[in-house]
Image: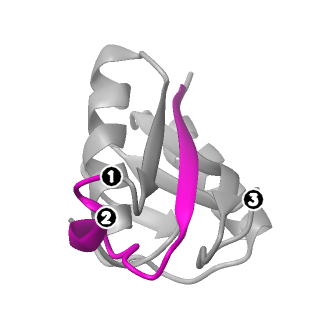
Amino acid sequence: MAAAELAVDDDILVKAAQWREAGRGVAIATVTETWGSAPRPVGSHLVIDEEGHFLGSVSGGCVEGAVVTDALDVIADGKARTLEFGVADETAWQVGLSCGGRIKVFVERLD
């Protein structure tokens, strides 16, 4: 996996379009809901290409690693999905949401 670069949302969407135009498989992950302590607001984006390169941010820590992994599946099978991370989830500590937050992230393939 390549390191994420910080960028404004317009840059992220431009990069997604460039990757797609270059023939790469691309997915976009968007924060659709937050509750409590969440590092990124609703509407934040992370774009991922089929090689695991990514740009943007939907949370931080291990959440983004999990989103990238799921995004690769979305690119492969074309099936959009909603991912949920939060303190009620047994993986909360593993994904870095141990301080009381919950987020929902929608991941879809760009065609």
The residue at 61%/77% (across/down) is: 37
Comes first in the chain, label 3 or label 1: 3
Residue 99 rendering spot, x and y as whole percentages: 45, 82
Residue 79 rendering spot, x and y as whole percentages: 42, 16
Viewer-proximal residue among 21 and 101: 101
Residue 80 rendering spot, x and y as whole percentages: 49, 22
Q: Along the horizontal axis of the image, is 95 left or right of 17?
A: left
Compute the Cα span from label 3 to label 1.
Answer: 20 Å
Residue 99 visible in the current orientation? yes
Q: Tags 3 and 1 in contact by the CB under 8 Å rule?
A: no
Q: Disc 1 marks which amino acid?
A: Asp
Q: Which residue has dot 3 on it?
A: 42
The 10 Å Cα crowd at callout 1, few under 14, some 14 to 19, many 20 or more, is few
The 10 Å Cα crowd at callout 3, few under 14, some 14 to 19, many 20 or more, is some
Comes first in the chain, label 3 or label 2: 3
Q: Is residue 86 magenta?
A: no
Compute the Cα span from label 2 to label 1.
Answer: 5 Å
Nearer to us of marks 3 and 1 is: 1
Q: Which disc, if any, is residue 25?
A: none
Compute the Cα span from label 3 to label 2.
Answer: 19 Å
- Vertical arrangement, residue 7 with respect to residue 94, above or below: below
Quarter location, residue 85: bottom left
Q: Which residue has dot 1 on it?
A: 89
Q: Disc 2 marks which amino acid?
A: Ala
Which quadrant does the C terminus fall into? top right
Q: Which disc, if any, is residue 92?
A: 2
Q: Which residues are magenta?
A: 89-109
The 10 Å Cα crowd at callout 2, few under 14, some 14 to 19, many 20 or more, is some
Which quadrant does the N terminus fall into? bottom left
Q: Tags 2 and 1 in contact by the CB under 8 Å rule?
A: yes
Q: Disc 3 marks which amino acid?
A: Val
